[in-house]
Image (cartoon, rainbow, N blue to C red):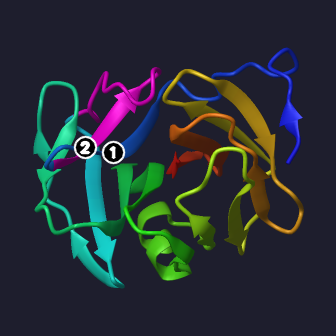
Amino acid sequence: MVLISLLLLPFNLFAHDFWMFPYQKEIRLCGGHDFPRCELAPKKNVEVSGFIMEELKEEELDFQRSENYLFVSRSEGHKNYITGFSLRRGGKVMYCGFSFVYHDEATKIVVPSEMVRKYCDLDFSITLKNYPFRKGVSANMEFQGMWFPTWSFLSEKGKKGYLQMKKEGILDFIPQEKGFYLVVTEERNRSISISIEVR
């Protein structure tokens, strides 16, 4: 994966980003410029939907509102799961995102195209291999059905950069830090974020 110099492109492609994040006994939907710190919640006039998928079983999330984030309570039993969300205004998707929380190692994780279509209103699937990712080892994400040429990324320790997707639909890079990362792109006037963990 080619890392594009920050001198060549402005970093902020979007006004602010949104992501889902596990915190103690909650799953939070946060927004802001300083991932993973929660700075703002989606506005009250934005339609919010979300899900958690564990062992291929999907459950819709009923968010509650805090001062600067939305949240749902979760039980201690959730160990390996995918979460996702959609932000819509006037019925149109403005932002969608997916988060991967796995305590156990998985050789392959798939978000099927019908799930992506439901929350992003786009036709593609997401495949992660050998997850959670490892520091110093190539982090591999495959997007089948659509091609998103340029992504920005943020690490929870403040590292920023750009990634270039391969024409085969593969987004990969070698993370140099442990922790959570947010990778973001834009397609058809909507933003897409992926939250991943590196150990």
Is 6 placed above or below 149 here?
A: above
Query: Which label was assigned to residue 49?
Result: none
Quarter holding residue 133: bottom right
Looking at the image, tell me whether mark 1 or mark 2 is earlier in sequence order: 1
Query: Which label was assigned to residue 28?
Result: 2
Segment colored magenta: 26-43
Label 2 crowd (10 A; few <14 / some 14-19 / many >=20): many
Residue 148 visible at all = no
* Label 2 SS: strand
What's the CA distance linking mark 1 and mark 2?
Answer: 5 Å
Considering depth in this image, is 84 or 48 the residue closer to the camera?
A: 84
Query: What's under tag 2, amino acid-wise?
Result: Arg
Residue drawn at point x = 37 percent, y = 50 percent: 88
Name of the residue lying farthest toward the top: 7
Are the two marked residues, 1 and 2, in contact with CB atoms closer than 8 angstroms? Answer: yes
* Label 1 SS: strand
Considering depth in this image, is 181 or 124 the residue closer to the camera?
A: 181
Q: Position of residue 173 (x, y in %)?
A: 76, 47
Is 141 placed above or below 36 here?
A: below
| Residue highlighted by disc 1 | 21
Query: What's under tag 1, amino acid-wise?
Result: Phe
Give the main secondary structure of the magenta stretch.
loop
Indicate whether residue 37 is drawn in magenta: yes
Residue drawn at point x = 31 percent, y = 76 percent: 54
Q: Position of residue 145 (x, y in %)?
A: 72, 75
Label 1 crowd (10 A; few <14 / some 14-19 / many >=20): many
